[in-house]
Structure formats: C-alpha cells, structure tokens
Amino acid sequence: MLERIVATVFDEISKALAGGHRVELRGFGAFSVKKREPRTGRNPRTGEQVAVASKRVPYFKTGKDLRDRLNKEAARAAGLTPTA
C-alpha cells in the first residue's frame, strides 16, 4: 500500500513538472524545471563535436528546514557544536 502511495505522489509531481509547474513540499524542498539552451558538446569516446539540442531538465532545491537538519546531524557526527 505504501508503495502505491509513493508511486502516486511521484506520478503527480511528474505530471505537474511536465505541465511547467513548480512543486513545493514544505520543509523538504521544491521541484522545478529548468531549460538548458542548445550547445556544442563533445563525444567522450571520439572527441568529435556534436550539437546538443535545448532541453528541459528537472531541478530540486532543498528546503531550509531539511538543509539545517542535515547540517546539524553532520556537525553532531563530526563531534562539532552546530552554530545557530
């Protein structure tokens, strides 16, 4: 049952992003879509230049609460006293 709930949440986030919307989960972070402009890339195997088309890519930015919690845990694990 939990698997179905998680799949449904991810499906809804995917649909919203495909529609050009931003999805925010308070205290966790925000999902959005960024556009990458066309550019000239390089084939890593041959070194040949290749044209890379513009594309839209998903982007996730962590929320302040999550970032603070992670940094406090990391400082505690390292034996440091977290500031603020």
Image (tube, rainbow, N blue to C red):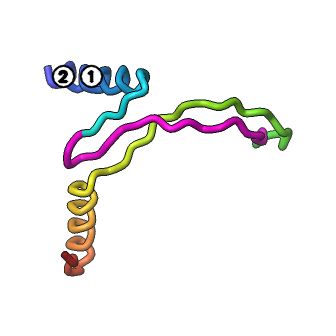
Q: Is residue 35 magenta?
A: yes
User: Could you say which is closer to the camera, residue 67 or residue 33?
Assistant: 33
Which residue is drawn at the image coordinates 84% and 43% (left, top)? 47
Which residue is drawn at the image coordinates 84% and 39% (left, top)? 49
The alpha-carbon separation of the residues under discs 1 and 2 comes to: 5 Å
Q: Which secondary structure lies at badge 1? A: helix
Q: Which secondary structure lies at badge 2? A: helix
Which residue is drawn at the image coordinates 60% and 38% (left, top)? 36
Q: Is residue 6 magenta?
A: no
Q: Does 17 appear above or below 70? A: above
Q: Quadrant of residue 10?
A: top left
Q: Position of residue 83 (x, y in %)?
A: 22, 78
User: Could you say which is closer to the camera, residue 48 or residue 54?
Assistant: 54
Q: Does 30 appear above or below 4? A: below
The N terminus: image quadrant: top left
Name the amino acid, label 2: Ile
| Residue 84 appears left or right of 56 | left
Label 1–label 2 contact, CB within 8 A: yes
Q: Residues within 10 Å of mark 2 (few under 14, many from 20)?
A: few
Q: Position of residue 75 (x, y in %)?
A: 25, 73
Q: Quadrant of residue 64?
A: bottom left
User: Could you say which is closer to the camera, residue 37 or residue 74?
Assistant: 37
The C terminus: image quadrant: bottom left
Q: Does 77 appear above or below 80? A: above
Highlighted magenta segment, given as a residue range: 25-43
Which residue is drawn at the image coordinates 35% and 24% (left, top)? 16
Q: Residues within 10 Å of mark 1 (few under 14, many from 20)?
A: few
Q: Provide the residue designation for mark 2.
A: 5
Q: Provide the residue designation for mark 1.
A: 7
Q: Quadrant of residue 20?
A: top left
Name the amino acid, label 1: Ala
